[in-house]
Amino acid sequence: MLDVLVIGAGPVGLTLAAELARFGLSTRIIDKAAQPTATSKALVIWSRTLELMDRMGCTQAFLDAGLPCHGASIRGGSELLGHTRLDSIPSEYNFALMIPQRDTERLMTAQLGRFGITVARETELVSFTEQDGGVLAELHHADGQVETVTSRWLVGCDGAHSTVRHGLGLPFDGAPEPDDWVLADVALEGPHAPPSDEISLYLHRDGFFILFPMPGPRFRVVATIGRAKPDQTPPDPTLASVQALIDQRAGGGFTAIDPQWLANFRVHERKVRDYRQGRVFVAGDAAHIHSPAGGQGMNTGMQDAINLAWKLALVVQGAAGTHLLDSYSVERSAVGDIVLRNAGRMTDMATLTNPAAQALRNTVMHFALGLHTVQAFMARQMSEVEIGYAHSPISVGRAQGFKGGERLPPPLYDGSPPGGDQTPRFILYAADKARGARLVAGFPHLLAGEPRQPPNEAALLIVRPDGYVGFAGKADDWVGAQAYMAGLLSR
């Protein structure tokens, strides 16, 4: 029986399949599309995603292909409301990496190929049922062949119109945003063209307008163009209409040329409550969609995949009880709620239409963005390094400045990233190496190698394969540590 069948070969599905394969699980990934994404689509990879890629061994390939973006400016008309640098992000990757989705998919496909797995394209999931300790899936191929596949687990990474989500009957609660939007991937030339390593946001009285730098060098233009009419789809933008937006909302002084992609779109904000039903999971856009404000959709989905992969691996390998998988939905649904709420607030703020509200917004932002603490807070939020799992069932304890569920900063790893081996294991951080070695020996399939030096000798930490603290206790709390590890094995 196949261990895991992954539906959808976008960035999320590819990340999940590559991690499962790295951990030695028999994995198959299918996609109904004949070819991978040819357009830029999702454009930014944030700091926390890059940190998690370190344990996968593929960060450098992404850095080589992308463009580091080091700051952002916000303007209200011609007035500079604020400017922030991303250098304050507490990460080695203190920038936003701008990289078109087509390149993200290409590089993740190469990562998957390192383990001998290719995407089965023009292969569509038609139906699935859970039975006999597995999931029976019916697949249709382009040549008319009908195939049945049985896997222990099935994961839907198949986008906003997910067949898996529909098959589970999961409510996709939410609503569309009221505006029509346009995007354009263009080159910019002229004396007042924006910096090529900064995001430039313009809060104009007529609507939202933003420029994202891209490799090339090129820029992504994103703008609202008025209230959406449910029964009417606006035509795709032209280069002339994009230039008109630049002149009106960014003050002109530069020209858009050489368009590579011109499109319109509408924004929906929707999310499922539960990411798991039995032996079937959803991740990425199949579980949550929202405004592109902040560029966090793909990052959130890829982190869904990384979170789920190591848990599935430990369960399939018999190293942990199946209840470990319950933490996936608890953790990632809470993160999805936060991302959805923040993206919605950013969009609402940027698309205000009342002149008095716009003036108040600009005054408040001008003051707030002058404060270093506000700038640093925004950078941490956008980079996702502040994501944590304080309310997870596998986050326990607090001691000496550390608490269960928080990210352990990579400089404190005292070695390679947790989870970087071919089998996912927790890492013990303990000053008493003899006692630590005995705990490791008692859980050889859950704890890796020798105990590492704790960041604070008064603390005893057990760190998950994704670099989050699972257990935090005082240096002599061996009873608590033993109970935590035993809890992972139970059921």
Image (cartoon, rainbow, N blue to C red):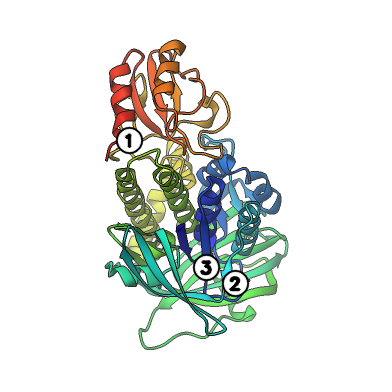
Q: Is residue 281 left or right of residue 9?
A: left
What residue type is disc 1 on? Leu
Q: Quadrant of the N terminus?
A: bottom left
**Which residue: 30% across, 62% down?**
272
What SS does tag 3 mark? strand
Residue indicated by mark 1: 488
**Quadrant in which the C terminus is drawn:** top left
Q: Position of residue 466 (x, y in %)?
A: 46, 39
Which residue is at 58% across, 61% downward?
211
Q: Residue 268 got which mark?
A: none
Q: On the image, which quarter does residue 259 sit in?
A: bottom right
> Dot 1: within a 10 Å radius of its alpha carbon, few (fewer than 14), some, or many (20 or more) residues?
some
| Image x and y of residue 61, in percent | 68, 49
Distance from Cα at disc 3 to Cα at disc 2: 30 Å
Q: Earlier in the sequence, mark 3 or mark 2?
A: 3
The label nearer to you, 1 versus 2, is 1
Q: Which residue is mark 3?
A: 30
Residue type at tag 3? Ile
Q: Does 401 sit left or right of 295 as displayed?
A: left
Question: 151 above or below 325?
Answer: below
Q: Residue at x 39, y 79 (%)?
A: 228
Q: Are marks 3 and 2 in contact (CB under 8 Å)?
A: no
Label number found at residue 184: 2
Q: Secondary structure at mark 1?
A: helix
